[in-house]
Image (cartoon, rainbow, N blue to C red):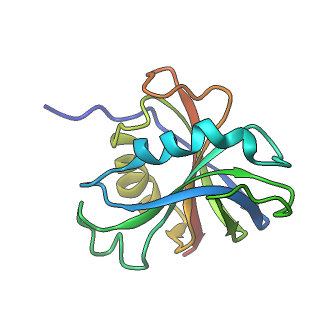
Amino acid sequence: MTPLVPKVMTPKIIEIELKRLVGMHLTMSLANNRTGELWRKLMPRRNEITDPLTADLYSLQVYSSTHFSNFQLTNEFEKWALMEVANFDHLPEGMETFLLPGGLYAVFDYQGLSNDPTVFQYIFTNWLPNSDYLLDTRPHFEILGEKYKNNDPASEEQIWIPIKPK
């Protein structure tokens, strides 16, 4: 059976400035996915984060430089649950700061289940190799805005993939 291929997705190419984020992180792998545990820690406390720039949540991954070239389901990475803030003046106890470096991103508007791997298969095996870009080593992230609904096929989010020109 052929896996479902997401609708043809054409990303916006966006350059961002440095962002200040506050939240929590865990080390995990796809084989030992602790995403639910991470969000269960942050969500009851998100209102403690002061000076948020928006109500959007960031689901962010920090991968090693060899994560994708030597890909295995057991490769570990840092997963962060965050909010963007204006400053780091009031850091809630048990939370950490994260400086997201500026740079170029391919931004995909995605609708569907957040645990559906076909969207990432499309991005990394179809769009990226056929684009004018290479994967960069900066963090990857998703912005979960007002239309995000966990475990709902009508959920909407933005997928931000760090890129650099070929």
Q: Give the position of the C terminus as an image quadrant.
A: bottom right
Q: Is residue 116 visible?
A: yes
- For this rendering, which residue is in front, 49 or 115? 49
Locate the N terminus by quadrant: top left
User: Who's the residue at 18% across and 34% down the image?
Assistant: 2
Q: Quadrant location of residue 73? A: bottom left
Q: Depth check: give the residue in front, 10 or 124.
A: 124
When the figure is inspected, residue 145 is found, relative to residue 162, above or below; the finding is above
Q: Position of residue 133 (x, y in %)?
A: 54, 67
Number of labelled discs? 0
Q: Is residue 160 above or below residue 150?
A: below
Residue 62 located left or right of residue 2? right
Q: Residue at x 75, y 48 (%)?
A: 49
Q: Position of residue 126 (x, y in %)?
A: 38, 53
x and y percent of residue 158 in the render? 60, 42
Q: Quadrant of residue 91?
A: bottom right
Nearest to the observer: residue 163 or residue 130: 163
